[in-house]
Structure formats: C-alpha cells, structure tokens
Image (tube, rainbow, N blue to C red):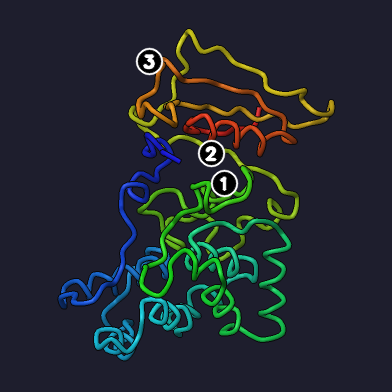
C-alpha cells in the first residue's frame, strides 16, 4: 500500500527507511550499524550506555557465530531488556511492548495477548521471548538476517482497522520511546481497548505540514447503514487517492475525503480505502 504523506501520522521515517539486512562481507562499520539498529528496535528507542551493551553477543555476531535473529534473541532475553520491560512492568504492558519490539506491530486481539500471558505463567519469560522470535510470522517477515522494524501501520502486517489504530498507541513517530516520553510508563495502554475491540483516534502530527484540511468540494460522506442506533461513529479522513494500476499519481487534484463510518463497518471501509489506493490521514470518534 503506498502510504503517501506518512508524515501526517508521524511514521514517515519508518516508511522511507528500507529494512536493514545483514549480508556477507559487511565492513566493521556495517556490522556496528546493524548492532545499533537491533538495540534501537528491541529496546524501543531507549538509550543504551556503553556499560550496558552485550559485549559477548556483539562479538559473536561480528564473528558470524550469531545471525541477526539470534542477536535479537540475545538482546530480548538480556537482563537489560528484562529489567526495563518485564520485572518492573505490568503483565499486559510487557506483552504489548514485546509485540512492538519483536514483531513491529500491535497485538491483533485479546486472545493473542492472553496466549502470551499463558506462556509467561507456565513457561516463563525466556520461553515467551522465544515464542515471538520462533514464530512463523517472524521468520516469514524478517528471516535470519533482517532487523525487526515498525510495520503495524501497513496492511500486510495487520488484520483489521482496530489493530491499525492501536499501533499509534504504542508508537507515535520514529523518535518515540517505549519508556521515556510515554505517559503510560510501565502501565498497559491497550488492555481494555483490546478486550473490548475498541479503536482509538489517530490524529495527524502537529504543525502546518501535518494538518488535514477538508477542501470545499469534499463534503462529509456517510458510508453504510450505520448499524444499530447505539453504534459508535468514526470520522475517517482520507487523502492521496491513487490509481493502483496504470497511473501512480491521483486522477483527482482535490481528492481529500471525509467519511463517517459506524464501528461495525470500520474494517470493511478500511479495506475499501486501501483497495482504491487511498491514504488514511486520521481516524477520530464523533
């Protein structure tokens, strides 16, 4: 899906940066860059002091004894990771951050969160870390040599619009941290939202360049039957419509649209927008 003006949602750096992959013959500088990228992703943009670095796994990776995936595993199982995101964090906060750090997305639903909670209860912390890294999803997406990256805003990484909105509860831009700058701290952000399958508002980044303005020729459009009388309604702002087959540039100069959609039809509308080459600028409850 062409994400277009991703800066509206604060994910332009993610969208514009290609995956970081280890290949044969990398220089020492290239290997060091991969190590730093793993620390940055797995530790959620947290600063790592020199004394906290994992010297033994780093050396093993540089000598070719560890793949990127196994180095990711070493960092995620380290005392450094455990102390920041497990020992002092609420159970569901640990799980939602594991999804952000190791799979680059938000959890799909409560059942997925609960399954990892069960692993923590029955097998412990290290077995739970293995369950992410040994999953088919991890292997199919990152393989042995690609550093995990934030991908929860892309349709290939999520199953519904609710999960899409939850991504922005876990990460709001490339400079956001899993700890500092996040008011949630070590408390869960998605627990009740996932249990109730509740989408959250996705607001454009602040600043003139990130402001969505509806042109005069783009009135509000109601989609669907609006479900039941008690249905919650969400305002979806869409911009950057593109023809997905021949022309890469939108046919319409003024293509911004605003849709009012009932909760029951959010996922269906999300798929329709994606199929027509639209870019979601924001989602808010009305």
Q: Position of residue 262 (x, y in %)?
A: 72, 30
In this rendering, the answer to whether 209 lies above or below 56 is above
Q: Earlier along the polypeptide chain: callout 2 or callout 1?
A: 1
Q: Which residue is mark 3?
A: 253
Q: Which residue is mark 2?
A: 202
* C-alpha distance separating marks 2 and 3: 24 Å
Q: Circle 3 sits in a helix, a strand or a loop, which is it? A: loop
Left or right: residue 229 compared with residue 279: right
Circles 1 and 3, Cβ within 8 Å, touching? The answer is no
Marks 2 and 1, how far apart at CA: 9 Å
Task: Tell me where residue 183 appears, x and y as whole percent.
Answer: 51, 55
Q: Residues within 10 Å of mark 1 (few under 14, many from 20)?
A: many
Label 1 SS:
helix
Residue shown at 36% from the left, 47% from the top: 15
Q: Position of residue 161 (x, y in %)?
A: 61, 42
Q: Nearer the viewer, mark 2 or mark 3?
A: 3
Residue 94 falls in image quadrant: bottom right
Q: Earlier in the sequence, mark 1 or mark 3?
A: 1
């Amino acid at each position: 899906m062409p994400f277009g003006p991703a800066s509206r949602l604060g994910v332009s750096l993610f969208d514009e940066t290609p995956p970081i992959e280890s290949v044969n013959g990398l220089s020492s500088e290239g290997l060091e860059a991969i190590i730093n990228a793993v620390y940055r992703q797995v530790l959620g943009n947290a600063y790592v002091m020199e004394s906290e670095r994992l010297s033994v796994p780093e050396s093993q990776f540089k000598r070719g004894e560890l793949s990127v995936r196994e180095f990711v595993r070493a960092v995620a199982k380290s005392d450094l990771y455990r102390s920041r995101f497990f020992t002092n964090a609420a159970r569901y906060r640990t799980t939602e951050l594991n999804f952000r750090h190791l799979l680059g997305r938000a959890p799909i639903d409560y059942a997925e969160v609960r399954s990892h909670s069960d692993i923590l209860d029955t097998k412990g912390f290290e077995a739970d870390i293995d369950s992410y890294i040994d999953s088919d999803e991890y292997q199919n997406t990152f393989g042995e040599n690609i550093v995990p990256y934030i991908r929860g805003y892309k349709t290939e990484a999520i199953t519904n619009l609710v999960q899409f909105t939850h991504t922005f509860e876990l990460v709001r831009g490339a400079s956001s941290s899993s700890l500092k700058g996040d008011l949630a701290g070590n408390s869960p952000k998605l627990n009740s939202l996932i249990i109730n399958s509740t989408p959250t508002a996705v607001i454009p980044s602040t600043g003139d360049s990130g402001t969505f303005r509806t042109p005069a020729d783009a009135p509000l459009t109601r989609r669907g039957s609006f479900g039941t009388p008690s249905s919650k309604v969400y305002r979806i702002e869409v911009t950057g419509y593109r023809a997905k087959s021949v022309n890469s540039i939108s046919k319409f100069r003024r293509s911004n649209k605003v849709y009012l959609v009932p909760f029951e039809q959010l996922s269906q509308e999300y798929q329709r927008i994606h199929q027509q080459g639209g870019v979601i600028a924001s989602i808010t409850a009305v």
